[in-house]
Image (cartoon, helix red, strand yellow):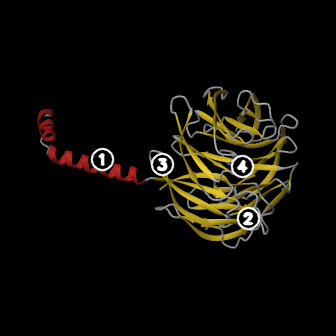
Amino acid sequence: MLRPTRRIASKAPRAAIATTLTFLALVSGVHAGMAETFAYVGNADSNDISVFKMTESGEMTPVQTAAFKGVDKPGSSTPLAITPDHRVLIAGVRSQPFQAVSFAIDPKTGQLSPIGNGPLADSMANIAVDRSGKFLFSASYGGNKVALNPLAANGVAGEPKQVIPTGLNAHAFLPSPDNRFAFATNLGSDQVLGFAFDATAGTLTPNDPPAHKVPEKSGPRHFVFHPNGKFVYLIHELNGDVAAFTYEARSGAWDEIQRTTALPEGFNGKPWAADIHITPDGRFLYASERTTNTLTAYKVDAASGKLTTIGSVPTEKQPRGFHIDPTGRYLAAVGELSDSMTVYAIDQGSGALARLKSYPTGKKPNWVEFLTLP
């Protein structure tokens, strides 16, 4: 009884099967090829955003300069954030009246169209969208505060729901990977504040303990979570330190396990560290330093979370911001004093950076966001 069954199966037209497989492969290829990657650069003195399209080889093509509607004066920097659904880009305006400017992202072209402006509580050095896409976190360096704004369905910020005084110089304010906590650096008070975050009610309450202290005059600035959610990395502006912590997701606790530096060998000047990012696979970490105009690369141990320094490379003048593309193959850094962006290839074996090409941006670029569409 089994023999006829095998014969029937063997009589299926091979040409038809081959045609079907070829068609499926083509369809799959079309869908894979349709994904496009874009880079968005916030330009403070130009009061706009430079939009670039990136090819598979890391080549950038400028596609748009998006101006801020209803904004007359430039601010000191232009922080950016993209909603989790990739539909909206938000820019923080640091001139009065302080605003969050929302743009719709075209899913095909990556270009930006103004949606509307919403109020911010102060001049905000950093903005971030929570994992639900319903709230905007922001931190004010000069105002010594953090704030939480609701986001409407179209991505425009409403009136601040909470404004919380902090220690000196709040610089970054980001949600935890599971959205249950939020953390804010206080650069002038050498601490990281922790808050329990209720994403349903949209409320922040001080965590227990409410703050994690770091060394005096180190100046904690930006931080990034490891993709596995078990580690967090913090760069310190005033001494150039990069600290690694274990992260306890249940309680939101940070526990320092290592301290290294973003300063190149032989440096003896005044540190001025800026930004920090990790590759999507969590294998490599990078930090920028503005006095030396360098990027330092680290290899991340997957088990311990500890860092091994790979080395430093020269980059744009005053590299306040940089980012890594979603594939983890490229890094783009901008220079506030060079008005340009340099793209690097990330060696997938060693993590070393190889300079590819530089591109002009607007004036005083300070922030980079990458996005792959659809």
* Lower position in the chain sequence, tag 1 or tag 2: 1
Which residue occupies 61% across, 70% down? 115
> In this figure, which residue is indicated by the disc labeled 1?
25
Compute the Cα span from label 3 to label 1: 27 Å
> In this figure, which residue is indicated by the disc labeled 2?
74
* Lower position in the chain sequence, tag 3 or tag 4: 3
Question: What's under tag 4, amino acid-wise?
Answer: Leu
> In this figure, which residue is indicated by the disc labeled 4?
174
- Say if mark 3 contacts mark 2, CB within 8 Å: no
Residue 101 x %, y %: 67, 66
**Residue 141 or residue 353, whichever sits in front:** 353
Question: Does residue 27 appear left or right of residue 211 in this picture?
Answer: left
> In this figure, which residue is indicated by the disc labeled 3?
59
Question: Does residue 51 appear left or right of residue 219 in this picture?
Answer: left
Compute the Cα span from label 3 to label 2: 29 Å
- Say if mark 3 contacts mark 4, CB within 8 Å: no
Compute the Cα span from label 1 to label 4: 41 Å
How many numbered discs sit on the rendered protein?
4
- Say if mark 1 contacts mark 2, CB within 8 Å: no
Q: Determine crowd level at label 3: few under 14, some 14-19, many 20+ residues with C-alpha closer than 10 A.
A: some
Q: Determine crowd level at label 4: few under 14, some 14-19, many 20+ residues with C-alpha closer than 10 A.
A: many
Compute the Cα span from label 1 to label 2: 50 Å
